[in-house]
Amino acid sequence: MTTNTNIADRTPATNQPVVVAALYHFARLEEHEALQAPLAKLCCTSGVRGTLLLAHEGVNGTIAGSRKAIDAVLAHLRAIPGLSALEHKESSAHRMPFRRMKVRLKQEIVTMGVPDIDPLEDVGAYVDPKDWNALISDPETVVIDTRNDYEVGIGTFKGAVNPETSTFRQFPEWVETAGLDDKTKPIAMFCTGGIRCEKATAFMRAQGFENVYHLKGGILKYLEEVDERESLWEGSCFVFDERVAVTHGLRESDEILCRACRNPVTPEEQASPLFEEGASCPHCYHTRSDKDRERFRARHRQMLAARAADAANGET
């Protein structure tokens, strides 16, 4: 089941930085369907854009807007029974990184597809960013990146295992075939903001792994709090908005998004003859036809025209 409230928003431009808030919280929301309309209305009237997912197991999403608007939405969420302890991570953007506001009803707020995995019942041990380096530097620790392959491709922690998944649904199958025979060895897992690791570590615990850890607040919190000179992070962290990726200090990095295949494209890949903005990149050129690329070019021209019209009307 997926129910979507998709609102095209038009927010006047300001000279203030846009606040970007990434959030999730597992909670038993008995009537989550009833939360959708009031939340969507508040976001729309406040000029907030982004995506929020609601399910019986909690809330997940990233939103962007003014300081006042983001605070209002967070206060609204924390007033919902079960969500009072909701935490969020903040960064900023030079321009609004979302085109619309979407509030969706889902079966899961992060889709693993394994019944009866409940992070509220059992989950791995949280590790603060300041303690993460020591854990993953231990040669006995198996460090696992639970994100998908296109995310890992532009950045990860030094020495981390890449499961090479294209969706999170593939992670349980990877665990079964990864050769993790010693269930007593420490396993350190991480993801963008922490939510995938909540389910991944709960799954690992259910499989009998005894010493399972995950990075509290995810990569975003690590990049925010750990000094770049001491960091074991290499590259950029993919984010699911128009900033594409961030790096230390949550600064926007130099990757852009391929409009044809939605993969992040590094500066080196942008120099490739296979890259054409809006039409192709080295990731997808050989899997798409000339007809496909012409369709992508037309779509890109339409997007640029819409942005120009927004700018002419004084909108972000």
Image (tube, rainbow, N blue to C red):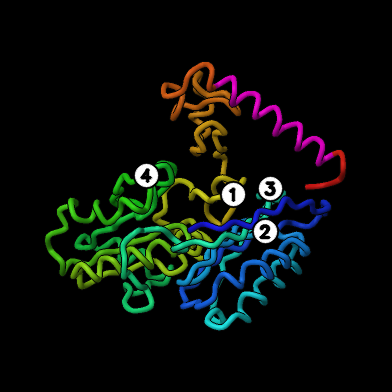
N-term-proximal mark, 2 vs 1: 2
Residue 180 in percent (x, y) is at 16, 58
Q: In the rendering, at what x and y percent does residue 3 appear?
A: 56, 58
Q: Mark 4 or mark 3, which is nearer the start of the sequence? A: 3
Task: Classify mark 2: residues with Cα within 10 Å, few (<14), some (14-19) or many (20+).
Answer: many
CA gap, disc 3 and disc 2? 10 Å
Q: Is residue 301 magenta?
A: yes
Residue drawn 38% across the image and 68% down it: 198
Q: Position of residue 251 (x, y in %)?
A: 59, 52
Q: Which residues fall within the magenta stretch? A: 293-311
| Residue 162 included in the magenta stretch of the image | no
- Label 1: which residue? 241
Classify residue 47 as left or right of residue 193.
Answer: right
Q: Mark 3 sits on what residue?
A: 99
Using a 10 Å C-alpha cutoff, classify the residue at mark 1 as few (fewer than 14 neighbours), some (14 to 19) or many (20 or more).
some
Using residue 282 as the reference point, say whether residue 91 is left or right of it: right
Q: Which badge, 2 or 4, comes first in the chain's sequence?
A: 2
User: Dot 2: what SS?
Assistant: strand
Amino acid type, callout 3: Arg
Label 2: which residue? Answer: 64
Which numbered marker is on residue 166? 4
Q: Amino acid at mark 1?
A: Asp
76 versus 11 height, above or below? below
